[in-house]
Amino acid sequence: MNLTTNQILDLFYEINPGINYAHKGNRDASEWLIQKYGLEMTIKVAQYAISIQGLSFTPVITTPYQLKLKLGDLRIYKMK
């Protein structure tokens, strides 16, 4: 696992202390997000997703895998 993948997983650790750093799905999703959007943008999106958890009608996103799957939901939530 590379350092940048760990940075993304570290962010999610704040809200999900049970996150499995060795989970292939989380690692692959982190790497995909970084490759597609860059590290800086991936960090910003992850931080936004984490910051809104618990608010009404927010998509539940507690892992990089969920972030990848729910990017569309997150974008629509932000546009409202």
Image (cartoon, rainbow, N blue to C red):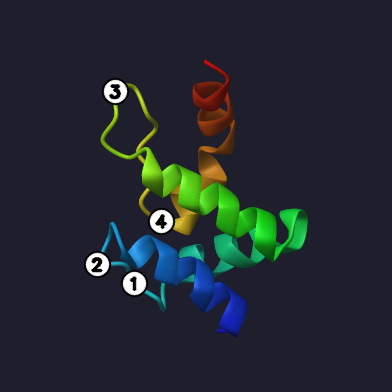
**Quadrant of res 12:** bottom left
Marks 1 & 4, CB-CB < 8 Å contact: no
Of the residues under marks 2 and 3, which one precedes in the sequence?
Answer: 2
Q: Which mark is residue 56?
A: 3
Marks 2 & 3, CB-CB < 8 Å contact: no
Query: Is label 3 in a helix, a strand or a loop?
Result: loop
Foreground: disc 1 or disc 3: 3
Residue ranking furthest to the top: 80
Indicate the position of residue 18 as horizontal and vertical percent values.
Answer: 24, 68
Of the residues under marks 1 and 4, which one precedes in the sequence?
Answer: 1
**Quadrant of res 16:** bottom left
Of the residues under marks 4 and 3, which one precedes in the sequence?
Answer: 3
Instruction: Identify the residue position indicated by label 1 in the image.
Output: 20
Dot 2, how many residues are within 10 Å of its Cα: few (below 14), some (14-19), or many (20+)?
few
Whole-number angstrom distance, CA of label 1 to CA of label 4: 9 Å
Instruction: Identify the residue position indicated by label 4 in the image.
Output: 63
Q: Which residue shows up at 51% across the image and 32% down it?
A: 74
Dot 3, how many residues are within 10 Å of its Cα: few (below 14), some (14-19), or many (20+)?
few
Q: Which residue shows up at 73% across the image and 61% down it?
A: 38
